[in-house]
Image (cartoon, rainbow, N blue to C red):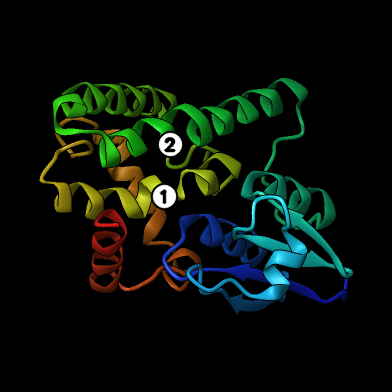
Amino acid sequence: MGEEVKVFGAWGSPFSSKVELALRLKGVPYDYIEEDLNNKSSLLLQYNPVYKKVPVLLHKGKSITESIIILEYIEETWKAYPFLPQDPNDKAMTRFWVNFIDGKCSSAIRKVAFSPEEEREKAVEEACECLKTLESALNGKKFFGGDTIGMVDIVALFIAFWLRPFQEIKGLELLSSEKFPNLFKWTDDFVSCSIVTELLPPRDKLVAHIKAHLSK
């Protein structure tokens, strides 16, 4: 398909990066439009009037919002490099893990970031329980999708690249090679893939970005 594809995103956003990674894995050319989230463009507000946030995928002049919905749209629109398995049961399990990571796991890590000091210990325990569940889910596989990057891996991109800088800034140990060896190795294998490495922001700049975000 040769239709024009645009992505409205923001630097340092794992949500934007998930969408870009999906398009690159599919080999879909796209134009990237950087948004200043402190001064949102009229186009962003036009294409996402409800949530007013990135990412937004524009395809054939129509907008799709919310990163997981965008990933599903990309999977259904471009058939090269499928992210979801064909077997109905395997597909259902993949969607289960996507929901777990995007919902419970993401929420638990956000609690660690923004909970008051007196609630921090409990928040860390909850986050580690989520990571423990993902550790078991990998079960010796290179990626959650098996030998190649799949939908679950794409959705878990924030764990692969954003979590380690975050925990260093906060002085915490959520993910380590001792606690979760499978998950830790997965993060290294995932971010060392050239198609992923090319997309990720420089680590030092990301650390500064996370610090600024946490201080707001």
Q: For mark 2, what is the residue?
A: 106
Where does the image place residue 171, in percent across and percent down from the top left?
10, 45
Tell me if mark 2 has few (under 14), some (14-19) or many (20+) residues whose alpha carbon lies within 10 angstroms of its own: some
Residue drawn where x is 67% and y is 46% of the image: 83
The vertical placement of 171 against 38, above or below, is above
Residue drawn where x is 24% and y is 64% of the image: 207
- Name the residue nearer the viewer: 41 or 55: 41
Q: Quadrant of the N terminus?
A: bottom right
Where does the image place residue 149, in percent across and percent down from the top left?
54, 49
Tell me the SS state at disc 1: helix
Three-letter code, disc 1: Phe
Q: For mark 1, what is the residue?
A: 158
Which numbered disc, 1 or 2, marks the residue closer to the eye? 2
- Number of disc labels: 2
Does the image show residue 216? yes
Of pointers 1 and 2, the one earlier in the residue sequence: 2
Q: Quadrant of the C terminus?
A: bottom left
Q: Is the residue under label 2 in contact with that under label 1 (CB below 8 Å)?
A: yes
- Name the residue nearer the viewer: 75 or 59: 59
The vertical placement of 43 against 140, above or below, is below
Tell me the SS state at disc 2: helix
- Name the residue nearer the viewer: 71 or 43: 43
Q: Residue furthest left?
A: 171
Q: Is residue 146 left or right of residue 95?
A: left
Three-letter code, disc 2: Ser
